[in-house]
Amino acid sequence: MKNILITGGAGFIGSHVVRRFVNQYPNYHVFNLDALTYAGNLENIKDIENKPNYTFVKGDILDEAFLEELFAKYQFEGVLHLAAESHVDRSITDPLAFVKTNVIGTMNLLNVAKKQWKDDFVGKRFYHISTDEVYGSLGATGLFTETTAYDPNSPYSASKAASDHFVRAYGETYGLPYVITNCSNNYGPNHFPEKLIPLFIHNIIEKKPLPVYGDGKYTRDWLFVEDHAVAIDLVFHEGKNHETYNIGGFNEWQNIDLVKLLCQQMDAKLGRAVGESEKLISYVKDRPGHDLRYAIDASKINKELGWKPSVTFEQGLEKTIDWYLSNEEWLKNVTSGDYQKYYKEQYK
Ligand code: NAD
Ligand code: TYD
């Protein structure tokens, strides 16, 4: 039995990765380390909580002594690091929280992995999950490749870029066996309703305004979260050490077009009149430093590891809407309390 550490496994993407690893690999014991911030929720992985090859550990990656003890006790052979502060808008109001978790937290994990694995890196792997936002913003054309220069614009992307650099530096300097992936925008079940798609699904259900930033012409490349989890599984097992892989959906949408498609699908699901939800669209003040366009060239992972997305955007969006409509209790729970305060501040 191999002990594997997954950080941030109570969050959006992490929960899908934990589920996949627990179900696919009975020969792994999966330790899910999560601080359960506002973005972490054990409900996300309720279905696997009693599996014999799964253990949840509540803890903060900022606590290095605790991490050292954990590593010494369980002798992890692999780390999949997803724990992070992940929302751009929050990074604009509280950048330091992002430096702490995303940079210092990653450093702590690197340090304990290096100390524990010492000079015997054989069979070990440190997998750092990152974002395409480190590359900055594209103009109307072009794609991010693995060799695109880093050019982050938000405190979130700057903190992720810094953490990527440290992971690479530990590889070059100390020989730590690492892989990094930079993925485009994810969507799907269990997504906290502060990001575009889950926020707008929530607001459409509640018939609340849909706050589109600026002119709505910003473009993102969307990937269904379960396809990201499959890519992560492949890279963890078959990716080459000291390599970076871009992961994307081959699926670019301008925000306003995406919102209109979402409104149409929601109207159909909710039995509302055609065009009813589009009336909720409300153009609001733009996000400062808003990146115009992200788009990923995912040909490396496609050619080298044979990965490609399994669902179209329309299919993925429908699955996502269905999940939110049949999990209204989850939505109610996560949008009570602190969420209301955040919402008032962000959209005042
Ligand atoms: P999320 O915000 O939904 O989840 C983050 C998880 O990390 C939460 O469960 C939270 O409790 C935990 N966490 C936060 N701070 C912690 C700390 N100090 N110690 C321990 N746990 C802590 O994020 P997500 O959207 O699932 O993103 C996961 C990873 O994937 C992040 O590293 C993010 O940068 C990256 N990523 C996200 C996207 C996306 O579209 N969401 C795209 C590409 C890459
Ligand atoms: P988001 O889901 O926050 O992801 P990211 O900023 O990491 O790409 O935002 C996706 C796009 O949607 C981005 O261009 C900002 C825009 N957006 C809105 O127009 N309104 C909103 O309320 C939010 C949260 C995002």
Image (spheres, rainbow, N blue to C red):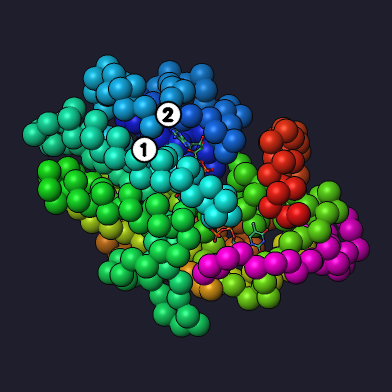
Is disc 1's CB within 8 Å of ligand 1? yes
Left or right: residue 193 compared with residue 250: right
On whether residue 267 falls in the magenta region, the answer is: yes
Residue 338, by quadrant, is: top right
Q: What residue does disc 2 label?
A: 60
- Three-letter amino acid code at the position of disc 1: Gly
Is disc 1 in contact with disc 2, using a CB cutoff of under 8 Å?
yes
Residue visible at 83% across and 54% down in the picture: 208
The span shown in magenta is 265-291
Q: What residue does disc 1 label?
A: 105
The mark nearer the N terminus, 1 or 2, is 2
Residue 285, by quadrant, is: bottom right
Residue 30 appears in view = no
Q: Quadrant of the C terminus?
A: bottom right
Residue 337 appears in view = yes
The residue at the far left in this view is 119
On whether residue 257 falls in the magenta region, the answer is: no
Q: Quadrant of ligand 2?
A: bottom right
**Judging from the image, what secondary structure is the residue with disc 2 in?**
loop
Q: Give the Cα separation between the discs numbered 1 and 2.
A: 8 Å
Image x and y of residue 29, in percent? 35, 24
Left or right: residue 207 compared with residue 145: right
Residue visible at 19% across and 46% down in the picture: 170
**Judging from the image, what secondary structure is the residue with disc 1 in?**
helix
Image x and y of residue 21, in percent? 40, 35
